[in-house]
Image: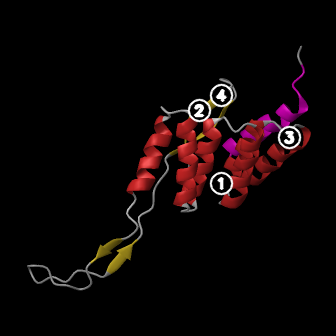
Amino acid sequence: MTKIPEHETWFNTGVMLLENKKYPEAQDNFQKAINIEPKFIPAWVYKGISLEKLQQYEEAIECYSQAIQINPDVADLWYNKGATYCMMKRYRDALTCFDKVLELEPDHALAKTTRALVIAKPPMIEIPANKPDKDGNKEGSNSEEVEISIPKYREWNIELGRFSEKEMEE
């Protein structure tokens, strides 16, 4: 019988906790895995995801940056970082990340789509202030910022041994 390395045990426990929406506990387990094996990229990725769930986006960016330092040639690390920048409305930083994804994997469909959404995002939609329409009805005054929704992110698939898409849960 093969013994599972200790860092993988902490990681697997963290994944279970993340799936059960116990984000702080999951984060602690991923950190324990990192403490044992600092170059274990999946732990950095999942720690980033758990931080995103807690809306701690700056800390999530740091996790993705650490993973990128370990291996800058993994396109999905750059994608996750870019998607997090989108959540922070830091679109220029997001575009830099998506450009890097496409440099590494020119056919990365999710990065192409998300990049296009960022570029196409109108900064503000103006609705006329209390001007009567042709029937004499008055419209409200409103300025509404349009947000970009990133429907998926990439995470490490343990069974497949690679990244795969996963639906975002609110």
Residue 95 versus residue 145 in the image, above or below: above
Q: Earlier in the sequence, mark 4 or mark 3?
A: 3
Dot 2: element: strand
* Mark 1, residue position: 52
Instruction: Quote the CA–CA distance across marks 2 and 4.
Output: 7 Å
Q: Is residue 136 left or right of residue 169?
A: left
Q: Are marks 2 and 4 in contact (CB under 8 Å)?
A: yes
Label ID, residue 38: 3
Q: Are marks 2 and 1 in contact (CB under 8 Å)?
A: no
Q: Earlier in the sequence, mark 2 or mark 1?
A: 1
Amino acid type at image mark 3: Pro
Amino acid type at image mark 4: Arg
The image quadrant that residue 54 belongs to is bottom right
Label ID, residue 162: 4
Q: Main secondary structure of the magenta part?
A: helix
Which region of the structure is painted magenta? 3-20
Of the pair 107 and 170, the residue shown nearer to us: 107
> Which of label 3 and label 2 is nearer to you?
3
